[in-house]
Image (tube, rainbow, N blue to C red):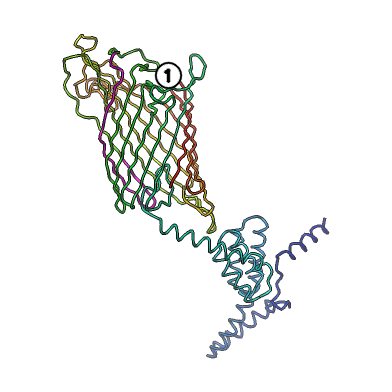
Amino acid sequence: MKSLLFFSFIMLSTAGLVFPQNLTGNKAPGAEQDEETLIRTGILLSDEGRYEEAIGLFRKAISRENSKTAVAYHNLGFAYELSGDKVKAMDAYQEASERNPEQVITLARLGTLQYELGQYRNAINTGEEVLRKDPRNQEIRKWLPDAYAKAAEQRLFHLGQEEDSTTGPSTSEGTCSDNSSRQYLVEYSVQPALLYNRNSSAFSVHKQNGFSYLPMSLRGNAFVANEFEIDVSLGSPDFGILQPNFMAAQESILFRIYSDRFFYGFGLLFTQINMRKNENPGLSSYYHNDEFTDLSDSKIGLHFGTRMKKTQFEISVYPNYPLGDAKSGPTSSAMDYVKMDLALRTQLNLFENQGEKSTSWPFFLTFAFSQDEIYITEYDVDGTGTHLGHYFGTYDISLGFELGELKRTMNGSSATFGMNITERLYGANLSNATINQFGNGQGFFGFSTESAISGNAFPSFRSNSHILTLYSRQIFFNHVIVKEAVSYEHTLPFEPYLGILFDFSIGYVF
């Protein structure tokens, strides 16, 4: 056993450990007694006023001490290197080289680690310093030519990024952080969902009743001249697994203008529903005017937000237009769609890799609130002169985090990973005859002025669910952006369905 330990020590020392010797190979002068003598003599000379001579002796004593500690720091760095911790090894080698700049073996190891971690410019400086002291050093000559080439490539890449950088929409999903003054995006996404029926213990696909069998969207985005953005989308959105699957299609056009830190704009939102498929899971039938099944709504909304270096805030509102009085006349139906989204995202640098070629891993905290409401009004139901209102609301409150940031890199790829926890509230109020009354249990989170007096302010609240989402985003070849997400929605025990939701999107930036 002792012979094995001795052999291991010999192998490590020849690989990179340094014994307390000077550059000539002789034992380092600087025994403890010699240094103490130098210090005592320096003190006596100072007392006699011979300051220059005293300073010389003190410097001599310090240099001897530094030589010994430089060896210790080198060996510490080499131990860290053998353990796999190259960052701490570099720190120790740096300390050793500062204490003894003539310890060439330390400089050589420091330069090699700088090269391996992608710090090409630092590696070049260290390597050239080694070759000035030891022109035949083979360790440096192995990697220095490649470091020159990599440093030039890295510099050209960063110059291109500086030329193309902008303060535009850098953190929205589907874009990457290093945008050019002109950036265009085309993206397709699909959101299939599996429903588990508690009653039948069977799975089924959550179907849409529009032009698309599954919830999906096709989106185009153009960001021009660092100041103007236009976003166009077409799809069939998901309204929630406990809501009727009558969503047929939705189209939007968004215009934004950017200043240094703020943006503002407006949008057009068009929504269509198909009342031929209006069943509400777990609730009775409610729709009467069967001849009016294709309903649509158009909205103008406002957008506002701020995008600072580490914090982004955005709000968009498509409001509920003032309701008119109940009207008499021919049988008909109308639909009104209300939407509001709020998002906050802030960055904390909790994780960061070392090295110029390594991508930093910023940590983002995210908060979001979304409100989607649909009002369906039936006028002169079945020719009876009765008017009925039906209200459905889905409200999401989300808190999450994302690790990493999509950005263009030298190797053309980067990735993020994230998680969201969402509390979803479902509201429903069917066949309400007081459609022109404020606070009638329809809208405003299902608020009712009448029942609020008795202690039930939100009688249209149906139930809530809890959603856990895990997702990842990647960019490939600096142009292709991919996102995958999976969610589990857990509803209350009396509701008929549980949900497993998927989200996949792919986009191209050019």
Q: Residue placed at 33% from the left, 36% from the top?
A: 341
Please name whichever residue, 367 or 240, is drawn nearer the observer in this view of the structure.
Answer: 240
**Rendered location of residue 487, percent (x, y):** 48, 31
Q: Residue placed at 47% from the left, 33% from the top?
A: 503
* Residue 331 vertical placement versus 213 (above, below): above
* Residue 68 vertical placement versus 350 (above, below): below
Which element is circle 1 on? loop
Q: Mark 1 belongs to which amino acid?
A: Glu
Is residue 307 a member of the stretch shown in magenta? yes
- Decide if residue 110 is on the left or right side of residue 183: right
Q: Residue placed at 33% from the left, 29% from the top?
A: 372
Q: Main secondary structure of the magenta part?
A: strand
* Residue 483 vertical placement versus 358 (above, below): above
Is residue 496 a member of the stretch shown in magenta? no
Question: Badge 1: how crowded within 10 Å, few (<14), some, or many (20+)?
Answer: some
Q: How many marks?
A: 1
Residue range corresponding to the magenta coloring: 291-315
Q: Residue 265's image quarter?
A: top left
| Residue assigned mark 1 | 495
Q: Quadrant of the N terminus?
A: bottom right
Q: Residue 325's image quarter?
A: top left
Q: Residue 211's image quarter?
A: top left
**Rendered location of residue 323, percent (x, y):** 19, 25
**Rendered location of residue 259, percent (x, y):** 29, 52
- Decide if residue 193 is on the left or right side of residue 460: right
Please name whichever residue, 471 or 510, is drawn nearer the observer in this view of the structure.
Answer: 510
Please name whichever residue, 7 or 370, is drawn nearer the observer in this view of the structure.
Answer: 370
* Residue 269 vertical placement versus 100 (above, below): above
**Rendered location of residue 71, percent (x, y):** 66, 69
